[in-house]
Image (cartoon, rainbow, N blue to C red):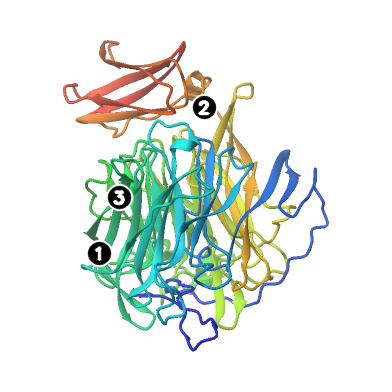
Amino acid sequence: MKKILLFILVFGMAYTISAQNARKAVSAQKLNNEVLMEPPASSVSTVVGTETDDSFTTTQNGRNITFIKIGSAGNAYGYYSDPRTYVWADPTINSVVFTHRMLGGTEMEGNSRIAYDVSTDGGTNWTDNVQVYTPLGPDPGTGYPLAAGRYPQGGILNPEGNTDPANAFYTYFICTLDNSNANWGGYAYGVNPLTATDPSTPTQTNLTTEDGYYRLIPDAFTITPQGVAWYVDGNYISAGGTNYDYSGDLILGRGELNDDGNDIVYVEQLYSFLEANDTIDDYKIAFSADGQTGYICVLSYVRSNPTPFTDTHPVLLKTTDGGESWSDPIDVQFGGVDGIESIKNYFPDSAIINAGYPQGFNRDEVYYSMGFSIDLIVDENGNPYITGIITPGDPGSRGIYPYEGMMATWNLYSEDGGTTWNADALYDPIWFEGDFGSGTNIIQQYNRPYVSSTYDGHYLFFSWLDSDLDVAEQNDRPNIYVIGYDVEDHTYSGIVQNVTLFTQAWNRAFYGSQSQYVFANLDEGNQVWNCEIPFVYEEFTVPGDPTEPCDFWYIDGYTLEMPLGTDEIKAEINDVAVSQNQPNPASGTTKILVTGKTNQAIRLTVSNMLGQVVYTDQVQSGALVHTFNVNVSNFDSGIYLYTVKVGDKTTTKKMMVE
């Protein structure tokens, strides 16, 4: 059962149940409530340049970071929950967008509308509050206009090969209060030419609950480099009041620009997944750079078929054909004999005993749980990476046990396409949850785990929130933490970095969010990629009150240096990266993705282990992304070498043919 907590707001009328705020049911013991207080001012000043009401520049560890105020919203609702796609960067056109509700007077004029903020110079200059969605009509007696926009997500829909922001589109995907599934029931989506901001010319399509599609609040939305948009939602039937029952189906939507290239069209399907009333806390979707290998990841305690010594955990569906078909469910087992050793051996005996296990417990008989939020990315090899909080589970309830010393933020990953799993502990959080507001207007802030990647999926970046201020009593004075990861070398970027330390956002990076993709610039001399990670956080205009207007701030210039590997140095001198072929092992057709702008010919050669050339292909490309489709159906089984040559620079990798 999925419970939606509807918070009470006063609109000068007798409407007591508000759909302003929604949150899935959770099993953790609630931490102490405390109204947010303004964090103390830093005694360390690192300001360089001029501080204004709309920007603030600091120097941190040699980085010049600018905090830029972008759009505003009528309240904090809509930004606090599980959807991940608020801020979206597209490095192929050096552009970034942020999606949010709007600011205004009455509900109809104000925060039931949806807007985006856009920068086409990598996040330095912005156009804010570009309206793209308008409700369908006045208040139908619920306190909100008909089909009020809620929990918006959005990104850049860029036709493959395009390098001009003027030819790209902004696209949004939202849920709406159309009252066809209790208060909820609707979706809406559309596009706007990315740079058509004054005036905007958006399209708008509204869907409602009908024909077996029971719409609620989608947490999963992504866009592939090929310009295909995807969303996922559970199919939830209203059970009366604030309760919703999971039907055993997922709603999958796949969207592309229409033939005229001026609107987005989605094709939906119901996909049978788990059983009715199996719990779902969160779900995400992501694809590899070639758009073919992708995963849907659901965070669930599968009541109908429990996994040994594992409570709430990721369950995945995999596609290798761009979403045409999906695999059977893949359960990630934490505990038990077949569990993940790094998780089973991470927590000290004292922590396990504090969770309720007896002295002399067997580590193969300890339950583990993940909650309540996750994020998902797919690397250059088509492998999934999941991040979130994992804790020992109480032996009685077996649920999550989120207390200091009892939990860790993890990189949970598979290097063989989801067959076997590993896990690296990234950080031990101090706090799990924080509350903002008072009385009936309380919203939560969990650790908000995110994982991003470079456009080719070679470098990954994990971020999360934690309150490390000594006087904090819950996760209500957050900083953003981040660490990078090299997929090929299996190395991290060093120690965890505090993004907001000694800045205006120190202890106040509320609901910090990270883009799915990052910007990357090659430093030839130092043989590193400077990877700039787009972040956005929220600022309350009235401290601690989520019902009042809030402002959004973009963090411009936060970079991590990621060293080049040996293979990369040969090819990426020309800003060209070559992916591992997918699928690998290959049969039929395999894809090799080349990213990085070049006006030279790109030549592909495939050779067997005797040095005999068995395949060649060549393109003259000025695009940032090119995919070679190699038919290996006539190749003998075995190991082959493929070489991509640009000018006098080459990269060689191995492929397996079944």
Q: Earlier in the sequence, mark 3 or mark 1?
A: 1
In this rendering, does residue 366 appear at all?
A: no
Residue occupying the point 48% across, 86% down: 16
> Please, what secondary structure does the residue beneath circle 2 have?
loop
**Which mark is drawn over residue 249?**
1
Image quadrant holding the C terminus, namely top left
Query: Which dot, 3 or 1, sits closer to the camera?
Result: 3
Residue 349 placement (x, y as % from top left) = 53, 64
Residue 299 lies in quadrant: bottom left
Left or right: residue 276 versus residue 5 is: left
- Specify the amino acid type for callout 1: Asp
Find disc 2 in the rendering and name its residue: 565
Find disc 3 in the rendering and name its residue: 265
Q: Earlier in the sequence, mark 2 or mark 1?
A: 1
The crowding category of the residue bearing disc 1, from other C-alpha atoms within 10 Å (few below 14, some 14 to 19, many at least 20), is: many
Image quadrant holding the N terminus, namely bottom left
Q: Is residue 516 above or below residue 645?
A: below
- Specify the amino acid type for callout 2: Gly
Furthest-front residue in view? 199
